[in-house]
Amino acid sequence: MSEDAYKKAFERERNARKEAERITELKSRELFELNSALKLLNDELELRIKERTSELETARNRAEANTKAKSEFLSMMSHEMRSPLNVIVGLTELLDQRELEEPEGGYVRNVRFSALQLLNLINDILDLSAIEAGKIVFESTPFDVTYAVDQVFKALEQRAIDKGLTWAKSVPDNLPVPLQGDASKLNQVLINLLDNAIKFTRDGGVELSLDQLQNRGNEGEVWIAVEVTDSGKGISEENMDRIFGKFEQENTSTRRVHGGSGLGLAISKQLIELQGGSISCSSEVGKGTTFRVELPFRYEGRVSEDVGARDWSQVNLVGLRLLVVEDLEVNRMLLRQMLRNKGIVMFEAENGKESLEVLKEHDVDLILMDLHMPEMDGIEATQRIREGRVKRVNAEIPIVCLTADVFKETKEAIFSAGMNDFVTKPLEMRRLYQVLSHWRKQIDARNAALS
């Protein structure tokens, strides 16, 4: 190769190398700028994520605080509304048992019905909130379904009579007793259905029928069918789907004419379905409507505490030493009346702190402990007893909670504190006697084992 050719080749190679270095430097600069831009973008995204996470955390905390505040408010309102109703329902039950002459007897029955109707509305509102919060809880206690239905039927009877309606009930004699389930929720559904039937019936009548569904359910399970039939105005086909909606009635004129919250059927449907049951409706305009409910209950066939075969007004509680802890004098008075002539030795305290002083001075077999009280509530008083911090008191003494607060958290707190059982307000004498009789048996068995 000549010298000129060699120089030209060398120059071309050098220029190519310079061009390659220039392109490499350019690409490196572009890559650096791109990496810098990506880093800025990544930093910005991380900042936004942190800000959004903080916002979500704040929103979650606010939602949890609102939920807690709502639960506490509903718990308080449940107690405050049920407490006076406890007295009205309890005293009218006592008066009704005296078989007063008319018109006084009718006055008492109407007062009792109005109180139960108000209580049912409160239950509907509280249950609606509990269902929406996923905190609804169902009791599982033994009860006589025939007795439960009969009490609801009697409570609404006067209203049907006042409207001049026939009022009929059909219940077979061989329904299993006791069934295990939530009697109060069944009563709530029945009151809603029967109240609606009376409300929308001008002529004719209302009939309530019960039956046991055969060959239905698993072993130890009993299915009960309830039908409420009226001869009222009926429901049009196009409005059939609306009747189970919240705050819904067939049309706006219905609420103007008949009143009502429009909650009853919506709540009833949810209560039934959450227990594994079903509700259906058939109707013909101008001829009437039938609502049919099918609900499962447990049945274990035990007869040691046959709540159906026993007249609980004759239960033997003689000699039981009972401490009632309740801050309202009117509620203590109601309990005195319910337990009078039972031979019970009854002590009283206005709050948890006072109850501990009473227990130091007197031997007691069982405690009825209110939940919400000033100075010291029922939870703290129970915890002190269970921890053995009260001299002369058996730390395992049976404690039954008296409460108008029926929320899940409350029931969990009751049992976590060491309470053995609970009775809800408004107090029903039959349920109170049943609980006291149960624990009387436990006390007698324990004493016999120690002797």
Image: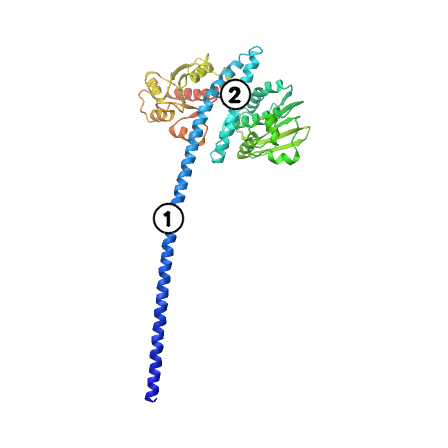
Please, what is the three-letter code of the amino acid marked with disc 1?
A: Lys
Q: Is residue 354 left or right of residue 239?
A: left
277 or 283, which is in the foreground?
283
Dot 1 and dot 2 residues touching (CB under 8 Å)? no
114 or 22, which is in the foreground?
22
Residue 424 can be seen in this image:
no
| Vertical placement of residue 308 versus 270, above or below | above
Residue underneath mark 2: 115
Q: How far from the left and from the top, in percent, is residue 108?
A: 54, 15
Residue 125 can be seen in this image:
yes
Question: For the N terminus, which image quadrant?
Answer: bottom left
Question: Mark 2 packing: few (<14 Cα in 10 Å), some, or many (20+)?
Answer: some
Q: How far from the left and from the top, in percent, is residue 403?
A: 44, 24
Question: For the C terminus, which image quadrant?
Answer: top left
Q: How far from the left and from the top, in percent, is residue 156?
A: 58, 21
Q: Secondary structure at mark 1?
A: helix
Q: Earlier in the sequence, mark 1 or mark 2?
A: 1
Residue underneath mark 1: 50
